Amino acid sequence: MTIAASSQDSGRPNHRLKGILFLCFGCSIFSLQDVVVKSVSGGYPVAEVLAIRCIVAYLPLFAFLAYDGGLRALRTGSFGWMILRSVFLFLAYTTYYLALAALPMSTATALFFSAPLFIVALSGPLLKEHAGIGRWLAVIVGFGGALVVSRPGAETFEPAALFSLASAAFYGIAQIMSRLLGPTATTSVTALYQNTVNIVCAAAIGLLLGHGGYAGQVHPSLEFLLRAWTMPTELDLLLIATTGLIAAAGSWSLTHAYRVAEVNVVAPFEYSSIILALFWDLVIWHVLPSPYTLGGVTLIIAAGIYVLRSAKAADS
C-alpha cells in the first residue's frame, strides 16, 4: 500500500505540494519572529513577550476563523486533545525562545531540528503512515546537514542547548496531534485554541514570576524567564506586537501544512528554517557562513528535494 493510500483510508486529507508550500511559508515568517524575540530577550521577560504577541494575534486569528466557518466552528468534540496539543506547543515555543536568548540563532535552530526525526519516528506507530528507507535516510541526511551547519563543539554543551532540544521534543508531539486532529478541527480553530492556551500560560507565568524576585541570574536564558515585567518602549512594543501578526499567520500555515499532507513528507522541509537563520545571523549579527555551513545547507536542500521526488514516485 502506498503512503497516499494509507492516509486516504484513514480519512485524512493529503495534498503534498500544498502542505510543503504552506510549511515553507510558515517557516519563513516565523524566522522574523525569532529575530525580534532574540533582539528583545535582554530587556524583557519571555512571558511578557508571549502575552503581547498573543493579544495582537487574536485580530488575524478571528479573521481566519470567520473565513473557516465562524464561531460555530469552535465547537469541537476534541476539546481535551486540542488543549493538550496547545500546551505542548506553548512549551515548545517557550523553551526555544529561552535557547535563543543564549545561543546564536543558527545554532539554536539547528539543534531544534531533531524535531523532524522525532515526528517521522512517531508518524508510523501513531498515524499508520509508512516512511520508507529512502525517506528515513533523507531525514537523517538532512539532520546531519543541520549538525554540519552548527558544527557542535564546546558551545553546544551550553545549558541553553537543552532548552532547544526540549523544544524539539515538545514540537514533535504537538505536530503529531495536529495530524490526528485534522478531520475534526479547522486550521483556524486549532490556531485559536493554541493562542488562547499560550496567553493563559504566559499570564500564569507572569503571576508567578513577573515580580522579578528571582531575577538577577547570570545565565541569559534564566534571566529571560525570571526578569520582572516592565512597560516596553514604544519601538520595542511595536516590534513585539508585530510578532503577534507573524505568529497568527505562521501558526495557521504550519498547522494547515500538517493537516493536509503526510507528516513524514512535509517535516523535512522545516530544515529551510536553518537557511533563514544563517541569513539573519549574517545580516544582523555579522556571522559569515563557513564552508561547513554551505556544505550542511546543501545536504539539507538535497534531502528535502529527495523527499518530494520520492513522494511523487510513490503516487505513480
Image (spheres, grey):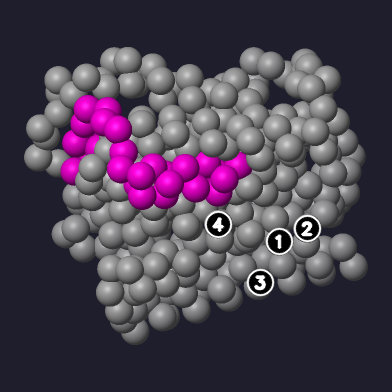
Q: Where in the figure is residue 167, as x and y percent of width and height?
A: 41, 40
- Amino acid identity at mark 3: Tyr
Q: What residue is at 27 percent from the left and 22 percent from the top?
A: 210
- Comes first in the chain, label 3 or label 4: 4
For residue 21, the mark is: 1
Q: Is residue 141 left or right of residue 18?
A: left
Which one is closest to the eye, mark 4 or mark 1? 4
Circle 4 packing at 10 Å, graded few (<14), some (14-19), many (20+), is: many
Do the residues under discs 1 and 2 have CB atoms within 8 angstroms? yes
Residue 129 part of the magenta segment: no
Q: What residue is at 64 percent from the left and 15 percent from the top?
A: 80
The residue range painted magenta reads 220-248
- Comes first in the chain, label 3 or label 1: 1
Q: Secondary structure at mark 2?
A: helix
Which one is closest to the eye, mark 3 or mark 4? 4
Residue 19 visible, this angle: yes
- Residue ID for mark 3: 306
- Comes first in the chain, label 4 or label 1: 1
Which residue lies most toward the front here? 234
Which residue lies most toward the bottom here? 291
- Amino acid identity at mark 2: Lys
For residue 18, the mark is: 2
Which one is closest to the eye, mark 2 or mark 3? 2
Q: Where in the figure is residue 190, as x and y percent of width and height?
A: 68, 31
- Amino acid identity at mark 4: Ile
Gap in angstroms between the C-alphas marked 3 and 4: 24 Å
- Residue ID for mark 4: 29
On screen, residue 233 above or below 3: above
Which one is closest to the eye, mark 4 or mark 2? 4
